[in-house]
Image (cartoon, rainbow, N blue to C red):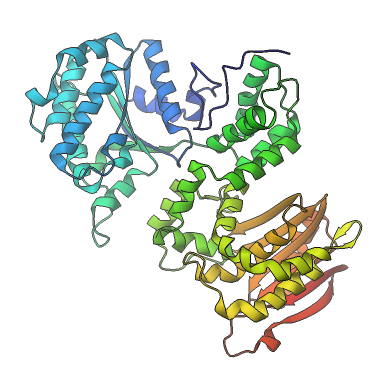
Amino acid sequence: MTAPTSKTFNTSGVCLPSEHYMIPVLPRLPDVEKMIEGKYYFVIHAPHQSGKTTFLNALTDEINAQGKIYALYCTLEVLNDVDDVDRAMSTIASQIMDDLDSSGVYVFEMFASTYDPNLKSNFDTIIRSLLRNLTASLDKDLVIFFDEADCLSSEPLMPFLGQIRSGYNSRHRSPKSKFPRSLALVGMRDIRDYLVQVRPETESRGLASPFNIKKGTFTLANFSRTEIETLYRQHTEATGQVFEASAVDQAWHWSEGQPWLVNALADQIVVEDLKNDFSVPVTGEHMDRAAETLILRRDAHLDYLLERLKEPRVRRVMEPVIIGARRLPVTAVEDDRRHVLDLGLLKRDEDSRLQMANPIYQEVILRTLARHFEDEFDEEASEARSNRWADGDRLDMTSPLKSFQKYWRENSDALAEPNGYSEALAHLALNAFLQRIFNGGVKVLVREYALGRHRLALFAEGVACPIELKIKSRQTLKDSLKQLRKYMDIYGASEGWLVVFDNDADKSMDEKITWETLSVDGATIHVVGC
């Protein structure tokens, strides 16, 4: 079936309705409509590349099309690295005028052609005066969305919010005083984090002036599986190319609804892999291959997230998750935890444990942190690779893990910390070793990261090999074996491996490097000491 190719998946997030496929706007964040109806000021925050800008543009278009009130989208991205207050206030005013002029709304364009904010106000009141005069010129109420609000640096932030609060308060004091009926600050962080940005750690974290004008804080959620199916169905309706149920399932598995990934996976398959041949149905296998391509390719969006791993406040939260620690260290305060969640690197599971946001992120993160190990594994990896199939129908983990023990015995004392993640060194080294051995031979390498557990499973042509990693501590061997046995049941595996790293500096390597095979509830578990 032939169809035009002008509509494509947009890898920057949710797609613009005039050019691309689009998920309905208001159902994604229904509380926004309530905020506008109630004339409230509020905050929207969501991780990097989660579709915030596209959502806001579509929402602005929808509000203006309804004709009840006016809506203006304004980006503050131009404020990045602008510390001078007067320059920042002038830049914000100019950006508002530019967005009015390019809005496509006639009354906005007329106002922009006649009003000069620089001649009518000083920098202490320029934003308040501009918004007041804009609102007074309109025949209907105004809602304004300030996107990229977290681009405001610490010096201009307080004056900007102070002018907004002043206009907000004057609107309530006098019915004749005009100001936007509703206003949203939109970015990656909650407004509480703006407060942390401009106040020392020792000061109060209460929402004092001018932060106390907000009515609510809302997070733009990831797509649901149903929304992924809806998005892909639009492509089917336009081109005739079918996304099979398995493809939707795997898109959901790999992305967990992260909008950039949902679009990037489809774009990789349709445009790059299938070369816009719409006669070929998209399958789950296509989606798996596309996920691996994204993991290896590491587009700008993924590189942005990986740069954040170097931040101390990110490392304080990420490292305990990688090693499966029972809890975060006392140095990782609540603001650190929220920052990492807002970045979209982590999420909470059904038990409220912190875990990796989606399988693609976790693969990219682990491979990036462990990359500098891989070149050191040539001899051991080659030896293990030559014997990796013990039988024709199962994956042999004995050879790989014995080879890793050899490597660990000879090199563990000299290993460098991977990007400062010293506590995760053992876990990263083993994961990198297995990755190097099975690269190209194993269909999927699945890892589980969460506070309180650390497991991984290798899948080769449907055969599961569950492995549990532990740092030797007060936790008993019995507890660890019990945990792994439950994990094996999930995958129907009769054989598992418990790898225990012993960090006791007083022990020799002969004491640490051990191998014991046990029978636990009818299953075989190998306890691998390192």
Image position of 390 with respect to 69: above or below: below
Q: Which of 316/416 is in front? A: 416
Q: Which of 442/523 is in front? A: 442
Residue occupying the far right of the picture: 392
Residue at position x 14%, y 22% in the image? 177
Left or right of 46 on screen, residue 130: left
Can residue 479 be spotted in the picture? no
Q: Quadrant of residue 515?
A: bottom right
Q: Quadrant of residue 216?
A: top left
Image position of 337 with respect to 167: above or below: below
Residue 34, x across and y down, in percent: 40, 26
Image position of 130 with respect to 1: above or below: below
Can residue 181 be spotted in the picture? yes
Q: Which of 359/337 is in front? A: 359
The image shows a total of numbered marks equal to 0
Left or right of 171 on screen, residue 381: right
Residue 479, x across and y down, in percent: 70, 72
Residue 340, x across and y down, in percent: 45, 52
Q: Quarter holding the C terminus? A: bottom right
Q: Quarter holding the N terminus? A: top right
Residue at position x 50%, y 18% in the image? 17
Residue at position x 70%, y 28% in the image? 274
Residue at position x 20%, y 32% in the image? 91
Q: Which of 308/25 is in front? A: 308
Residue 44, x across and y down, in percent: 39, 36
Image position of 332 with respect to 22: above or below: below
